[in-house]
Image (cartoon, coloured by chain):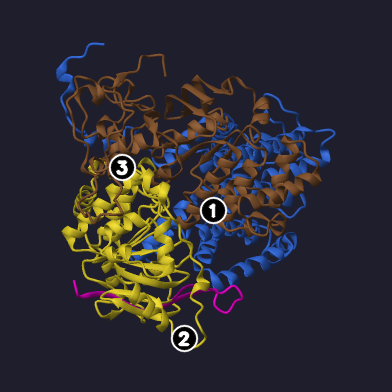
Chain colours: A blue, B brown, C yellow
Amino acid sequence: MEISKEKFQIVGTRSTEAEKISKPSLSFWKDVSIRFRKNKLAMFGVVLLILLIIMAIFGPYMTKFDYRTNNLVNTNKPPGSMHWFGTDDLGRDVFARTWQGARISLFIGIAAAAVDFFIGVFWGGLAGYKGGRIDEFMMRFADVLWGIPYLLLVILFMVVMGQSLGTMILAMTITGWINMARIVRGQVLSLKSQEYVLASKTLGAGLQRIMGKHLIPNTMGPILVTMTLTVPSAIFTEAFLSYLGLGLTPPLASWGTMASDGLPAIKYYPWRLFFPATFICLTIFAFNVIGDGLRDALDPRLRK
Amino acid sequence: MEKLLEVKNLEVSFQTYGGEVKAVRGVSFDLHKGETLAIVGESGSGKSVTSQTIMKLIPMPPGKIKGGQILFNGEDIVKKTDKQMEKIRGKEISMIFQDPMTSLNPTMKIGRQIMEVLTKHQNMSTSTAKERAVELLRLVGIPMPEKRVIQYPHEFSGGMRQRAMIAIALAANPKLLIADEPTTALDVTIQAQILELMKDLQSKMDTSIIFITHDLGVVANVADRVAVMYAGQIVEMGTVDEVFYDPRHPYTWGLLASMPSLDNDDKSELAAIPGTPPDLIHPPKGDAFAARNQYAMAIDFEEEPPMFQISETHFAKTWLLHPDAPKVEPPEAVKRRMRKLASTFEKPVLVQEGKS
Amino acid sequence: MAEKLIEIKNLKQYFNVGRPNLVKAVDGVTFDIYKGETLGLVGESGCGKSTTGRTIIRLYDATAGEVFFDGENVHGKKSAKELKKFNRKMQMIFQDPYASLNPRMTVADIIAEGIDIHGLAKTRKERMERVYELLETVGLNKEHANRYPHEFSGGQRQRIGIARALAVEPEFIIADEPISALDVSIQAQVVNLMKKLQREKGLTYLFIAHDLSMVKYISDRIGVMYYGKLVEIAPAEDLYKNPLHPYTKSLLSAIPIPDPESERTRKRITYNPSVHNYGDNEDVTMREISPGHFVLCSAKEFEQYKQQYR
């Protein structure tokens, strides 16, 4: 191999090059989103959820029937070109009711998740960060609340405050946040001794800053996963309560009340149960696969 | 001497979403019976991947052996199936890790963990395995081994755990022991004990050892031969005296010069190697070390240097050994340790392609 | 150099007080740190050297004892404002370059944290200029400001940690094993940087480490800790040439030296605490053997050590 002599001139280091980072900048959440999008099942869940939300928004306007008007001539009609999902025992259009119900079911789910988020993160974060006696007290309080039979609470609320959407959400979240609080507390407990938190402390950071800038952002992953899994459980709980007759009062429709109404007639008019039940399943399925997908995407062990 | 292991032109890559990380890029070395080869290098130099590939412990995928051979007793490990590897691991080749807690089973008594190896690979009966376990613990210098066998890993101190790990690794009399930074997590006084123990056991059992570390002090203590790795390649290899008293590669110089010396009061600035190791998704053109090399020549940025041979046992992969290269002075701290070694060739010889 | 910046008096840090698993992590440690010097603190893991550093900077509340900074007691009751002033004077560099930077924050926000907390920049522009300046100081550049910690190598991260500490312009920095987790070639970079900063800014360091060769190189004086107690403190050279406490001797004999020949001939000394065999009423304290060279010993040992000392 012949190499010209000039090539053997000493040129020294190229230090700027040695410090250069060639990879494109990638924030944590960008990285998560790349991995999430690679998960086909989770992406399917997202698409499904978007479709459900679109239908919940526009569905009721797509048919000329509204969800509450009785039409006693047209009771229990099977699905057809007139009533796409058929009608119920009072002649109300099931299609309109399904999407009206979707609004309420999704609202309940999301509201429950939001309330869990605010109370749970606050409570768990504070308990975990403060530690010691304060932690002990706060978590024992949560334990006590957790110990009260849940149905008993719901019934109590319904009796005292009347059956309404607000009562329903309140009843669901009275114990729902505890799970979130426990998860956040566990995370905060392990994160607060991390060196970056100590560094922030030595710089003079107060509680607010350490929580808001360090602890909560680093707990966001598990929080998000817990929230996406709270939504379907709230939807399911609503359906379950409605089925027991503890749910919303007519003419309000949720998937739960519709399913509960449809069940006695399952032999003769199966569509009255079929549609709400199917959409409950689809929604729960969508949220669950999204939650699982998020968990996988956030898992640091799967990062390169 | 008999060759136990020959690694030929090994290439290992990992598939990440950022691209293919070429972790090991053509590594060749061999290991004789009863010898200790130290592989030194920074994190990311490929030293751990190389050793894990010998045990076929790298996760595949994302890992992949892209090329080369690993001949163990003449048989190619690369071609072996998982099932065949199970018979080799723990019996023929075993491994000890930096953190014994991650490789010891926390829910199992130490004695049981040793016995498991013995009953699996040596077909020992439970009672003889039990005796042998106590014997092994005594061998690795654990006091009161009869009591210790029925304890759990968490009841052991860091140094004792590492000893227990060594006992497990040596239970089946392996021919090759791979030690991946076994003393890095330990205090110096404990480290010294463990190193002494390993040398002592080696002389008794005639095991070959591949010792992976980044600590040159440890290398000087344990190694017969040294391979210096950088960016997935071996850049210099030789006997321990050759590498410490007559280093030829500027990266080896850099490593040696960046350590302060204990015996003199020199407080002048340490000769640090500037910058950081290259990204192995896009290995730089030419010599991977060029950008950080104060002796880099124009050609280093264009052509990958070939291997030059300095003595029967000493190799270095740098253009500085080319006859046309200017004569350069190594850093002060390295010059102080340079010696003329008798075995050195008159002139560096270019190693022909295809021959290791 | 005679001016004392930090005085630590009989500092004690016990964990699990009042419970059966009481740990005396730091058990009555007394030493001074002079302005502009580097004091090295070495010992095995669990000897209390890191706890000492963390207690000095008030990450833990001391069980007993005092720490004076420029004559001012920093462990007394303090208002939030006084504490903040103190936070600016004393800073810390951490061991693990992977755990010491918040993975969700950009490098600019990490470095600017102190600037934000103490309101050291009036405008956004001023803040960013300060960040760029700090990045340059530690050998990085502007382009790195908007990246996230995981994109950097260990050495680069450690330098970011140093820039964060420098942002509040401290006088005293506690470096808690700042190079233990780094590769050899990178250790020298960080140590050189720390030395350069000390020259330029007149910083005082407490350098905690278990790598004795690096400690000897960077330190003016070295303290050796064993089980929560300071057993020997001396000028760096003196400690290496004339180790007196048997534990110091064993520690020094265990350091592997990158020289095959001396490794082949090394003699390891083991330390057995029972050699002291202190009596019940023997007064074991720090005694000065030669100027600046203190050893934890009894009156009897003191005489022996004096004889040994060359």
Instruction: Using the image as rendered, state which of residue C49 and residue B223 is in the foreground.
Output: B223
Q: Magenta includes C6?
A: yes
In the displayed structure, does residue B327 sit left or right of residue A253? left
Q: Magenta includes C193?
A: no
In the displayed structure, does residue C161 sit left or right of residue A121? left
What numbered label is drawn on residue C282? 2
In the image, is residue C79 above or below residue C197? below
Q: Which residue is mark 3?
A: B256
Measuring from the top left, give residue C218's x and y in whole percent: 27, 58
Q: Residues within 10 Å of mark 1 (few under 14, many from 20)?
A: some
User: Three-letter amino acid code at disc 1?
Assistant: Ala
Q: Residues within 10 Å of mark 3 (few under 14, many from 20)?
A: many
Query: Start and end of the magenta stretch?
Result: C1-27
Q: Residues within 10 Å of mark 2 (few under 14, many from 20)?
A: few
Using the rendered image, report if marks 1 and 3 lie on a common chain: no
Measuring from the top left, give residue A198's x and y in whole percent: 40, 62
Q: Which residue is mark 1?
A: A114
Where is the C terminus of chain B found, in terms of image quarters? top left
Q: Chain of mark 1?
A: A
Using the rendered image, report if marks 2 and 1 lie on a common chain: no
Measuring from the top left, give residue B308's x and y in whole percent: 32, 22
Residue shown at the point (25%, 58%) measured from the top left: C167
User: Three-letter amino acid code at disc 3?
Assistant: Leu
Q: Is residue B226 visible?
A: yes
Residue shown at the point (22%, 54%) measured from the top left: B266
- Which residue is farthest top? A1
Measuring from the top left, give residue A264's x and y in whole percent: 83, 41
Residue shown at the point (15%, 24%) measured from the top left: A9
